[in-house]
Image (cartoon, grey):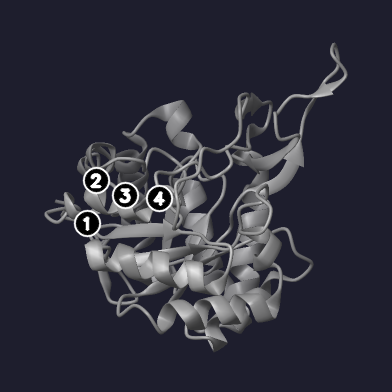
């Protein structure tokens, strides 16, 4: 048993520790989500699911670059009606199950979220930040009025917490956070991948089939920390930090900036599922060394004068 309390509560959801599986990483089936939870994640987020099945882009869709990963998978998913079977089979999961949803209109977001909650989702996370699919994600998530309309539409349909995952591909992310908060969001997730591309110098061609993708990994951590810090200054909502977290120091940095919890994504590809326990052990040792009794005591400390 740890000497300090790592338990975290976000919008009414109780988590045994502040780590979460990020959307888009492994969360495609009930078995994998259960395995991640058993490995020590404090909550799990599914891969984004929409109202209808979607194939996604042809390969190559994911490549490793020198500073992280670049992906343009294209939101492939079986559709919420099929995915409800996976959600229902996780009704005994010991940690919160957050279903990431996307749509091409407020009505699609709302209907997908409603069905996810009907199947048993603990909360929904609105993907308003995917940087490489036309008509959804960041394309509409950069529009303040669209953010408000989508959040309101979803809130009208579900009785569970609504997290809003924001894009860093904007000139001023606090405005997006304020728009989401004004429409009733229960928490903010920041950030998704950063729009980027890579070109093969031998073939002179973009490497990804979609040309443009989203950059994740260590390169985007300073961007993500800045976004969390800025959002913490303007909204009184729980913030979930995401972007380039590879170890306990990264997680602590996000919490000092204002995050109540952190999502782990790309690092799993490099270090495996044991990363959840290693980060928790590292946070625990840090808190004990600094004389804190609870992880909640360090949230936002970087803002103290």
Which residue is under mark 4? 79
Tag nearer the camera, 2 or 3: 3
Asked if 179 appears above or below 288 in the picture, the reply is below
Precedes in sequence: disc 1 or disc 3: 3
Residue 234 visible in this rendered orientation of the protein:
yes
Precedes in sequence: disc 2 or disc 3: 2
The image quadrant of residue 229 is bottom right
Instruction: Tell me how far mark 2 sits from mark 4, CA to CA.
Output: 23 Å
Which residue is under mark 1? 95
Precedes in sequence: disc 4 or disc 1: 4
Instruction: Tell me how far mark 1 sits from mark 2, CA to CA.
Output: 7 Å
| Crowd rating for badge 3 (residues with CA inside 10 Å; few <14, some 14–19, many 20+) | many
Which residue is under mark 3? 83
Which residue is under mark 2? 37
Tag nearer the camera, 4 or 1: 4
Assign a secondary structure to mark 2.
Answer: helix
| Crowd rating for badge 1 (residues with CA inside 10 Å; few <14, some 14–19, many 20+) | many
Residue 284 visible in this rendered orientation of the protein:
no
Precedes in sequence: disc 2 or disc 4: 2
Say how many tags the image has: 4
């Amino acid at each position: 048993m740890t000497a300090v309390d790592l338990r975290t509560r976000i919008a009414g959801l109780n988590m045994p520790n502040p780590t979460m599986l990020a959307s888009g990483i492994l969360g495609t089936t009930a078995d994998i989500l259960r395995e991640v939870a058993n490995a020590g994640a404090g909550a799990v987020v599914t891969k984004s699911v929409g109202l209808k099945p979607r194939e996604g882009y042809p390969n190559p869709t994911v490549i490793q670059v020198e500073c992280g990963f670049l992906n343009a998978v294209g939101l492939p998913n079986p559709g919420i009606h099929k995915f409800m079977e996976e959600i229902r089979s996780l009704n005994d999961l010991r940690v919160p199950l957050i279903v990431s949803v996307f749509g091409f209109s407020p009505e699609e977001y709302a209907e997908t979220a409603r069905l996810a909650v009907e199947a048993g989702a603990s909360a929904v996370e609105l993907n308003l930040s995917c940087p490489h699919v036309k008509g959804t994600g960041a394309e509409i998530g950069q529009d303040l009025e669209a953010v408000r309309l989508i959040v309101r539409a979803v809130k009208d349909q579900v009785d569970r917490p609504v997290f809003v995952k924001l894009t860093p591909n904007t000139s001023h992310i606090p405005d997006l956070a304020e728009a989401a908060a004004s429409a009733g969001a229960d928490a903010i997730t920041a950030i998704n991948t950063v729009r980027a591309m890579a070109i093969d110098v031998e073939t002179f061609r973009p490497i990804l089939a979609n040309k443009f993708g989203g950059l994740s990994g260590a390169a985007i951590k300073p961007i993500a920390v800045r976004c969390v810090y800025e959002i913490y200054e303007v909204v009184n909502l729980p913030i979930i930090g995401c972007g380039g977290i590879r170890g306990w120091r990264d997680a602590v940095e996000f919490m000092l900036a204002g995050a109540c919890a952190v999502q782990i994504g790309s690092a799993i590809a490099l270090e495996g599922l044991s990363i959840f326990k290693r980060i928790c052990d590292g946070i625990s040792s840090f808190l004990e060394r600094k004389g804190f009794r609870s992880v909640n005591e360090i949230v936002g400390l970087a803002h103290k004068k």
